[in-house]
Amino acid sequence: GINVQYDMGEARFGQVRGTSADMTSVTVNGNRLPSAEGDTRNVQLDLIPADMVRTIEVNKAVTADMDGDAIGGSINLVTKNTPYRQTLGLTVGTGYNWISDKMQFNGGLTWGNRFFNNRLGIMAALSYQNAPVGADNVEFEYIEKDGEIVLDVAEIRQYYVTRERQSYSLAFDFDLNPNHKFYLKGLYNRRNDWENRYRLT
């Protein structure tokens, strides 16, 4: 009942219970996320790098504490919380795309610790990705002419896309007592897309 739509090999839109992606609401830590495109309600899940996400909560049925405009369901991206002890994480990855003939890079750094007898927790994370990709595509269009099916249009296409993502996250929490806690979370994301399309008709 849960699937995603892909764009250039990356999961972009989430679908719940077989409905269209614009029927699903997307939140970050419970706060509604608007679409980055003006003519649709679809929320691009690839705007937030996976390095920043601790878990993903999916509700197939909207409950009373959620907005009532999600026919398909709700997807909640939960960012990383402050740790219970000092933590340090480093992610480095690379790849190569044969069509674009360029290297890809992915890096992330996460650090967290607790202070003042474990009452104050801090978690900081940053992520950077540069992914030049490409795709080859061939499309044909046939029509019926004089009772026969004939080729009308043939197109050979090439796509060259470079996606660059930057993300910065900072979270604090302060334990007043075992029953009360203050917390503050901030997340900044920036994504740039460059795309060149070539077509021979």
Image (tube, rainbow, N blue to C red):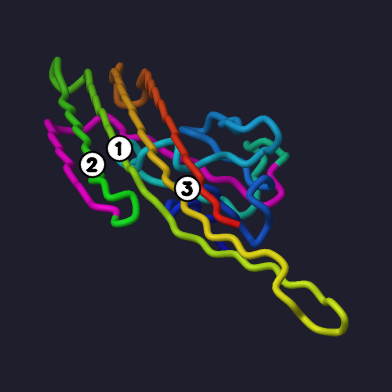
The answer to whether mark 3 and mark 1 are in CB contact below 8 A is no
Q: Determine crowd level at label 2: few under 14, some 14-19, many 20+ residues with C-alpha closer than 10 A.
A: some
Q: Determine crowd level at label 1: few under 14, some 14-19, many 20+ residues with C-alpha closer than 10 A.
A: some
Image position of 84 (left or right of 131): left
Segment colored magenta: 70-97
Give the residue type that dot 2 points to. Phe
The answer to whether mark 1 and mark 2 are in CB contact below 8 A is yes
Percent coordinates x, y for residue 139 in the rendering? 60, 64
Residue on which the image places disc 3: 57
Image position of 48 (left or right of 6): left
Q: Residue at x 32, y 42 (%)?
A: 131
* Res 51 quadrant in image: top left
Percent coordinates x, y for residue 62 in the rendering? 65, 47
Residue 99 included in the magenta stretch of the image: no
**Alpha carbon distance from label 3 to label 2:** 28 Å
Q: Is residue 46 above or below residue 34?
A: below
Residue on which the image places disc 2: 105
Image position of 175 (left or right of 186): left
Q: Give the camera-side residue of 198 and 84.
A: 198
* Res 70 quadrant in image: top right
Question: Is disc 2 placed on a helix, strand or loop?
Answer: strand
Q: Nearer the viewer, mark 3 or mark 1?
A: 1
Q: Is residue 163 above or below residue 15?
A: above
Residue 85 included in the magenta stretch of the image: yes
Give the residue type that dot 1 points to. Asn
Residue on which the image places disc 1: 130
Q: Residue at x 17, y 42 (%)?
A: 92
Question: Is disc 3 placed on a helix, strand or loop?
Answer: strand
Q: Is residue 73 above or below residue 182?
A: below
